[in-house]
Image (spheres, grey):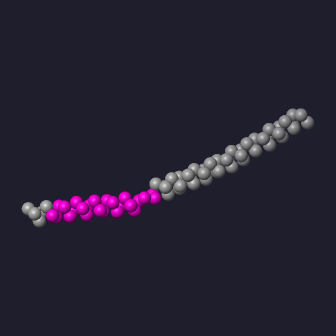
Amino acid sequence: MTLRLLQLYVAARMTAAELRARAADQDGEGVISTAIAVLVMALLGAAMWLAFKGIFDGAAQKAGSAVDRIGG
């Protein structure tokens, strides 16, 4: 009975130590994941800005040329 109790104690302590080691290995994972997400969102925002800018510049040129044709 004592040997079995010792085995259970050692197994429990080893499991606890392993869980602590796993948790310590992942300390910076949330920060890194957040930084990557922020970077991706910034790149998407810049791409959207360039796309909208191109669309609105093209529309402004077409509107300007239409006004010139009407007024000219």
Residue located 64% across and 47% down the image: 48
Magenta-drawn stretch, dominant element (helix, strand or loop): helix
Q: Is residue 12 magenta?
A: yes
Relative to 72, is 41 on the left or the right?
left
Corner quadrant of residue 16: bottom left
As drawn, the residue found furthest toward the left would be 1
Quarter of the image for residue 61 reads: top right
Quadrant including the C terminus? top right
70 vs 26, nearest the viewer: 26
Q: Which residues are magenta?
A: 6-29
- Indicate left or right for 23 with 64 as reference: left
Nearer-the-camera pick, 27 or 71: 27
Image side of residue 53 versus residue 17, left or right: right
Query: Residue 38, relative to residue 64: is it above or below?
Result: below
Instruction: Let me know if residue 8 is in the magenta part.
Output: yes
> Where residue 20 sits in the image (x, y, percent)?
33, 60
